Amino acid sequence: MSEIRDFIKKLPKAELHIHIEGSLEPELMFKLSKKNAIEIPFKSVEEIRLAYKFNNLQSFLDIYYAGAAVLITEEDFYDLTWAYLERCKENNVLHTEVFYDPQTHTNRGIDFDIVINGIHRALVDGKNKLGISSKLIMCFLRHLDEADAFTTLEQASSHLDKIVAVGLDSSEIGHPPSKFERVFEKAQSMGLLTVAHAGEEGPPAYIWEALDLLKVSRIDHGVRALEDEALVTKLITEKIPLTICPLSNIKLCVFKKMSEHNYRKLLKKGLVVTINSDDPAYFGGYINQNYIETAEALSLSKEELALSAKNSFIASFISDEQKKIYCDLVDKTL
Ligand code: ADE
Ligand code: ZN
């Protein structure tokens, strides 16, 4: 094993950009489709894997939403989340902030409570049995309308103890953050923090809107920020983190190849950038694989990798005391 791979495996990390539905491995998808008698358009696990060839965000989302249809019971959501937490353990992820998309499930008749209760119960067990701390972030699907998002926020109002923030995901182009300004305002009045996907495929203007209108604490992706100098200055001076997902960006053709990814440029400029897996079952790897492929393609040093790991704790929604404990652990690996 190369020295840098070994270093990455030992590095304590937080993951801040992971869609729990995107951790649904083909094996579990196949098993659940049989158990729940939900038809999927694949005859085998191998066929599912072969279908994972995408040319943009939408081509991925079409398959991703179809796959999520096998999730029916609270136990299914528990098992999905537990499987991800076991991967966290293998990848030395000490803290994770998990996205989920309630509308993907409620819009096909699954009760809001079933979804959140299954995920939350696994996260509690993850803390107790694996020592992994976590937060849950409820995302709105931006291709749906404002009214649907308001209904979802209302459904969440009796579960505020289980979620730390709201987020915004799904098809970016044509669905600017401004579409959800009033929903996010209401979420904040309920005590929730906010994050949003912006600048993945969409223009820097969407990142401005996420900051100015949705008052986000972090930008998810944000790689297109580099096209706007004033925006870069704002992100640096206000220390607004970007949760970057390198393998996702390659699989969805945001960059042609990893050697062209701008991660190192952003890090060198002093932005608070972090490395994450996004939808690891679909994009070819969990967080360590993202660190490894980014490090190898961009020749990241151990110091740059440790800085990325420290950024992940600093950018998280844990307490300052906890951030210091985790960052000290990272320093000890150098
Ligand atoms: N939902 C799951 N993965 C996503 C991504 N990369 N961008 C937008 N929405 C998503
Ligand atoms: Zn994402």
Image: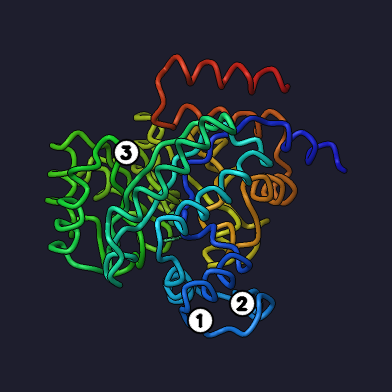
In the displayed structure, does residue 160 sit left or right of residue 16? left
| Among the 4 quarters of the image, the one containing residue 151 | bottom left
> Which of pointers 3 and 2 lies earlier in the amino acid sequence?
2
**Which quarter of the picture shows residue 329?**
top right
Residue at the (58%, 83%) spot, across then down: 42
Q: Secondary structure at mark 1?
A: loop
Label 3 neighbourhood size at 10 Å, few (<14), some (14-19), many (20+)?
some
Residue 83 picture location, percent across and down: 58, 51
Is there any visible trace of residue 89 in the rendered image? yes
**Mark toward the start of the polypeptide (1 vs 3):** 1
Q: Which residue is mark 1?
A: 40
The circle drawn on residue 164 is none
For ligand 1, tell me if the residue under mark 1 lies within 8 Å.
no
Numbered disc 3: secondary structure: loop
Q: Which quadrant is home to the N terminus?
A: top right
What residue appears at the point 35 percent right and 67 percent down from the top-left corner? 171
Q: Nearer the viewer, residue 27 or 278?
A: 27
Q: Are marks 2 and 1 in contact (CB under 8 Å)?
A: yes
- Alpha-carbon distance for marks 2 and 1? 9 Å
Q: Amino acid at mark 3?
A: Lys
Tell me which amino acid carries mark 2.
Ile
- Residue identifier under label 2: 48
The residue that mark 3 highlights is 162
Find numbered disc 2 in the image and state the secondary structure of the residue it sits on. helix
* Amino acid type, label 1: Ile
Query: CA–CA distance between discs 3 and 2?
Result: 33 Å
